[in-house]
Amino acid sequence: MNGPISGNFKLYIEGLIEEKKSIGYPYDSSARILKVFSIFCLDHYPDETTLTQEIAMHWAEIRQDEHVNGLVRRITPIRQLAKYMNRIGIEAYLIPAGIPGKLVRYIPHIFTEPELRSFFAEIDRCVLSPYSPARHLVIPVFFRLLYCCGLRSSEARLLNVEDVDLGNGQVTIRHSKGNKDRNVMMSDEVLNLCRIYEAKVSRLFPNRLSFFPNQSGQHYHDSMIDYWFHLFWNNTGLTHLSSGNPPRVHDFRHTFAVKRLNLWVQDGKDLNAYLPYLSMYLGHVHLTATDYYLHFVPEFFPMFKEKTMGKCAPLIPEVSDETG
């Protein structure tokens, strides 16, 4: 959502965003929600200059077909706005804690090998587009990089050419979750794929900024990534899901993490020693975010449970929400 913020709460919203960014938070998704909130206030309360209980609780009403986790994400920035306003001496109603309740734990879709083969076979059939000359080259490499490196969709989408070192296979992820940078190494197979890709794409966009360029040589919008995923997933004809909820782009990252843990167990690795490496590779701020995956490995790989019974059993946690 482009354009400046408007409305009676413009000054406070911009102040909150500036404060968050000044201490190192990207705050982009919350800023988008706050902008939608400013439009909501203009539409429903155009003359109201106080963040009242009526406004806040109207915003906090769950919408038709809205998941409770989505409502939590929508409410959180408005709570932060009220706290910010109160902190600078402006009266504002703070949505009480406990609304709408606890997050519902999301059960990710862990792709099976047949599902992965079917999906990648479909994206390899991607044809040349008259509107985006590199699309047929971008899509097969983009989704393989997501899965093989466990990246977040935004991390791959926002890669610049300078971030991908095709000499040593290092990918630099900049300003990711928690506003931290990290380095990710590609396997030899993925590196070779990226070298072939780069040779072809650079002929179309020799001076581009984005490693995965749209028709203008810039970064794709996140909505296009979701569109591609569902388009090619639906083409697989796979209607019976092996596990979890309907698959999403982010589930490639979940699948990478769960399968990596299982491979380490197969190889007899000590998870106590190896889990921090996975946490750093995935760019998790806290190790507890990586512990999340330990809960799911036994569901998809029974051997994991057998081999970890005893010394590693206490590692498997109970979790209450989804992490990234």
Image: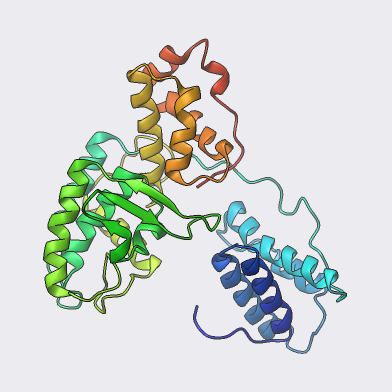
- Residue at point 18% right, 43% down? 189
Residue 221 point in image, percent of width and height: 37, 70
Camera-side residue: 292 or 122? Answer: 292
The residue lying at 62 percent from left, 38 percent from top is: 320
Does residue 125 appear in the picture of this structure?
Answer: no
Question: Residue at point 58% right, 62% down?
Answer: 64
User: Which image quadrant for residue 8?
Assistant: bottom right
Comparing 242 with 206, the one in front is 206
Instruction: Measuring from the top left, give residue 214's x and y in whole percent.
Output: 27, 73
32 sits left or right of 134 in the view = right
Examine the rendered structure and indicate whether residue 178 appears above or below residue 158.
Answer: above
Q: Is residue 148 above or below residue 243?
A: below
Q: Left or right: where does residue 92 sit relative to residue 15?
A: right
In this view, 184 is above or below 259? below
Q: Is residue 200 above or below residue 271?
A: below
List x then y, in percent, for residue 121.
16, 48
Q: Residue furthest front?
A: 167
